[in-house]
Image: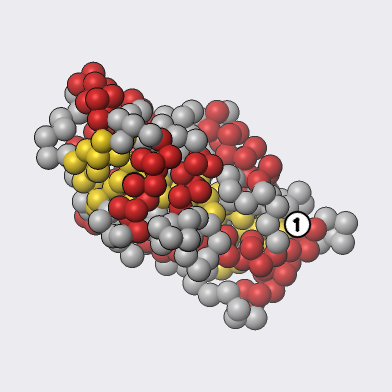
Amino acid sequence: MVKTFSQLLEAAKEKGPKTLAVAVAEDKEVLRAIKEAKEHNIINPILVGNKEKIEEISQQIGLDLKNIEIADEKDGPIAARKATQLVSSRKADILMKGLIDTPIIMKQVLDREIGLRGESIISHVAVFEVETYHKLLFVTDPAMNISPSLEEKKDIMLNAVELAHSMGIENPKVAVIAANEKVSPKMEATLDAKELADMYRSGQIKGCIVDGPFALDNAISKEAAKTKKIESPVAGDADILLVPDIEAGNVLYKSLTFLAKAKSAGIILGAKAPIVLTSRADSQEAKLHSIALSVLLSSK
């Protein structure tokens, strides 16, 4: 079972290398992450974008382009489309966002002709390594779905469970998060949490343990759960935090990143192939870890 990002990289080395198509690859931080991922032998990149700029940046950072395919395309949206087509045609295993806005690349991902839309909802999961927590912590969905319905929350959760399985976590513990642990008709998040927990208990949700509602403290702290007399196998030991909406997820994501200085990774799930869609504010290390996550998921 993968419990740290060091173990994640080792697991990706065993599964890789996988072919990764980068859309609009002329981005220094992305190419630095590509360089490091290639040094770890977890990917074989195909760089789609402005060849002249890619070569210029690669020379600056010491990325050896020998044996790396470059598809020269100066138009950003067209480059995003070509990179997506490489994945949908199975010439590449993973899609990665480069120097292009998220809505533009997601338009290609969702395109009916060449896109990667699967049967599940498309969602985002962030994975954190926090010094104060005893294992990797998954947060979903902090970036894609604004205010998911009960059924959408179920699918978002199952996407994250699939990722956890790819990391050797056989029966991940899912804490459905709300403002507190008591069910209240005035708080929809608590009602949804109870419904999801009931679905699990009735056998409608498999491959994980689901409970809730949890406030954040008793989801990740056994002492907090004990103080509030909460008895659950998930309490204080959650693998996955299913947040109620994008605001809660985004605030938690950025709090862990900037206040707790947690190491992180992020990936888009629910498509026909993994999508590495990191922010320009994410570190090179976060981009590398995100690539490693995608390698494991594409190996399932």
Quarter of the picture holding the N terminus: bottom left
Q: Looking at the picture, does residue 156 appear above or below residue 146? A: below
Q: Looking at the picture, does residue 167 appear above or below residue 263? A: below
- Taking depth in this image into account, of 277 and 3 the one nearest to the observer is 277
Residue at left 30%, top 30%? 50
Q: Looking at the picture, does residue 78 appear above or below residue 147? A: above
Q: Does residue 36 appear anywhere in the picture?
A: no
The quarter of the picture where residue 70 lies is: top left
Residue 275: x and y, percent? 41, 50
On screen, residue 38 versus residue 189, left or right, reads: left
Residue 107: x and y, percent? 50, 48
Residue at left 25%, top 51%? 19
Q: Looking at the picture, does residue 238 appear above or below residue 194? A: above
Residue 32: x and y, percent? 29, 29
The residue under label 1 is 189
On screen, residue 55 versus residue 28, left or right, reads: left
- Label 1 sits on what residue type? Ala
Quarter of the picture holding the C terminus: bottom left
Residue at left 53%, top 42%? 103
What colouring does the structure picture have?
secondary structure
The quarter of the picture where residue 92 lies is: bottom left
The crowding category of the residue bearing disc 1, from other C-alpha atoms within 10 Å (few below 14, some 14 to 19, many at least 20), is: many
Q: Does residue 52 appear anywhere in the picture?
A: yes
Residue at left 64%, top 63%? 152
On screen, residue 111 versus residue 152, left or right, reads: left
The residue positioned farthest toward the left in the image shown? 66
- Taking depth in this image into account, of 109 and 288 the one nearest to the observer is 109
The residue positioned farthest toward the top in the image shown? 60
The residue positioned farthest toward the right in the image shown? 186
The residue positioned farthest toward the bottom in the image shown? 202
Residue 4: x and y, percent? 38, 46
- Taking depth in this image into account, of 39 and 269 the one nearest to the observer is 269
